[in-house]
Image: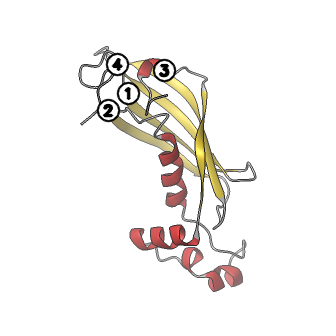
Amino acid sequence: MAYGRYFEEFTVGQVLKHWPGRTISEADCTWFALLTMNQHPVHSDAHYAEKYTQHKQRLVLGPLVFSIGIGMTVADISGKAIANLEIERITHDRPTFIGDTLYAETDILDTKESAQGDRGVVAVETRVTNQRGEVVMTFRRKALVPKKNHPTLGEGRLPV
């Protein structure tokens, strides 16, 4: 399939498995903490995490898990999107640790054609799992996706 999907290519109840997965390195965690100015030691201080936390190891920042999870969905969900409309909710279901590999799959919850007739809103729920198949994060979002008859994003045209 080409990068992204048109509105007509989504079906309520459809489950899309995103590939490939992404293994979280120490550098990923450290750089993301630095970029976002998150100074909590549970993300950057191995000694602190081992001595003072229940998991006895550093935790990957939740926003990094979300960023990777949503990034994995772009080719299948929003690659052709006119706009990302909302993130409805994000739940942290389990911790993610350095060295974990993340995977994602998305359920198509709803599709609603717009009044313009050349686009529609697609509502989805994505589950991010680790290499053990444990759900570590769940989020819902909506994207405005063109139909194949969209005047500027239709078949064979790329968005600017």
Picture residue at 54% right of the left edge, 65% below the top: 61
Where does the C terminus fall, quadrant-wise?
Answer: top left
Q: Is residue 127 visible?
A: no
Report x, y in % for residue 118: 31, 17
Picture residue at 24% right of the left edge, 19% below the top: 151
* Earlier sequence position, callout 2 versus callout 1: 2
Q: Quadrant of residue 138?
A: top right
Q: Amino acid at mark 4?
A: Ser
Which residue is disc 2 drawn over?
A: 82
Which residue is disc 1 drawn over?
A: 145
Marks 2/1 in contact by CB < 8 Å: the verdict is: yes
Q: CA distance from mark 4 to mark 3?
A: 15 Å
Q: CA distance from mark 4 to mark 2?
A: 12 Å
Q: CA distance from mark 1 to mark 4?
A: 10 Å
Decide if residue 59 is on the left or right side of residue 155: right
Which residue is disc 4 drawn over?
A: 114
